[in-house]
Amino acid sequence: MTSEPMRDPVTDHLLTPRNSALVVIDYQPLQLKVMTSMDREVLVDNIVSVARLARTYDLPVVLSTVNAADGQGNTLPEIKAALPDTPEIDRTTMNAWEDVEFRQAVEATGRKKLIMTALWTEICLAFPTLDALRDGFEIYPVVDAVGGTSPEAHRAGLEPDLGGYAEYALTSSWTRKPPDVRWSDAAALPSSAEAAVGVLKQLRLTGGETLLILGAAGSVGMIAAQLAVSRGATVIGAAAPRDHELVRDLGAVPISYGPGLADRVREIVASVDAVCDAAGKGELKEAVDLAGGPARVVTLADEHAADLGVAFSAFTSDRAPEALDQTMSLLARGALRLRRQRHLSLERAAEAHQLLESGDAHEKLILDAP
């Protein structure tokens, strides 16, 4: 038998110790605590094994954390023990690729093949992966050494193109639809209800407090506003002028987005107790000022939240398991109002996504199966 000549380990199209680098992002105590897609001890063992293997083969390693100085904590000690001479690059950006020092460290390795690991899969791995791919790098995630806030989020983060619609689906969690609830309303409820109930729990909102909702006329904002009002809270809802009457009907005080938002809020109250940002329109800094700091501010949509120390709304299976039963009951009694709907056939799913991406959809889009 005759073997082919030895391939060049620098230019080879496969991974070799001479053409790749290891990137380790945000393996910190808080991120690990929220990770639920696999056993935490197994994940730590796996990422430590990856780090040790990188040292064995003398791979360049880029190690990064986010907001370590502000309470997020440094890299897990087990990983630091495996990478004792690797400096930590601490960031304030959620997307590591948007940090100049991080990106320069990756470029300085001289390697185009990046073995990428991060917590969480759907954010800290997915965001820099997409940017690095755009910039000409090849990304190789270590799937059993990364984790997400849920198994579903983990899978979606590893497969950013994953998605689809069908007439039937298998699920491990379900709620019976009451006879008085339309199928379209039942379909529109679950994700928005979980987010609304979950965020209010994260904010620890109680009666007598004041809640500012950015995006009060959206699917999540509408539900959050009604639930907060029912608990005796005062709700100020930021929305487009066309939706002010709707926000008022929900029991909230409407205000407009844009410059001067904080002044408009202060014309109503001196400050607010908590903020739910369901819009991601760039009003987060003013919201933090109004709340007297980021401790009781949660965003669903602003990717720059970490810059301000704001928590991201992160789905976990145990965050608000009661959400769907609670809101479905309210819906059946006519005590919950949902966003106006626009129906498209299942075959027009691509058109629905185009509407969402264009910003021209001012309704909840529902795909009707045949």
Image (tube, helix red, strand yellow):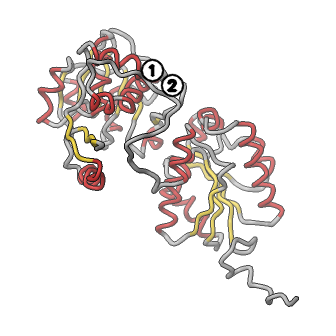
- Label 1: which residue? 201
Badge 2: few (under 14), some or many (20 or more) residues near its Cα, within 10 Å?
Answer: some
Mark 1 or 2, closer to the camera: 2
- Label 2: which residue? 319
Amino acid carrying mark 1 in the image: Lys
Front residue (pair 53, 344): 344
Question: Closer to the N terminus: mark 1 or mark 2?
Answer: 1
| Quadrant in the rendering for residue 27 | top right
Q: Position of residue 225 (x, y in %)?
A: 28, 22
Image side of residue 168 versus residue 186, left or right: right
Image side of residue 287 versus residue 2, left or right: left
Residue at image position (19%, 33%) is: 340
Q: Position of residue 341 (x, y in %)?
A: 21, 36
Residue at image position (30%, 9%) is: 232
Q: Position of residue 251 (x, y in %)?
A: 20, 17
Badge 1: few (under 14), some or many (20 or more) residues near its Cα, within 10 Å?
Answer: few
| Quadrant in the rendering for residue 63 | bottom right
| Quadrant in the rendering for residue 19 | bottom right
Tell me the SS state at disc 1.
helix
Tell me the SS state at disc 2.
loop
Where is the C terminus found, in terms of image quarters? top left
Amino acid carrying mark 2 in the image: Arg
Where is the N terminus found, in terms of image quarters? bottom right
Q: What is the C-alpha distance between the residues marked 1 and 2?
A: 8 Å
Residue at image position (23%, 22%) is: 337
Q: Above or below — where is 117 with respect to 271? A: below
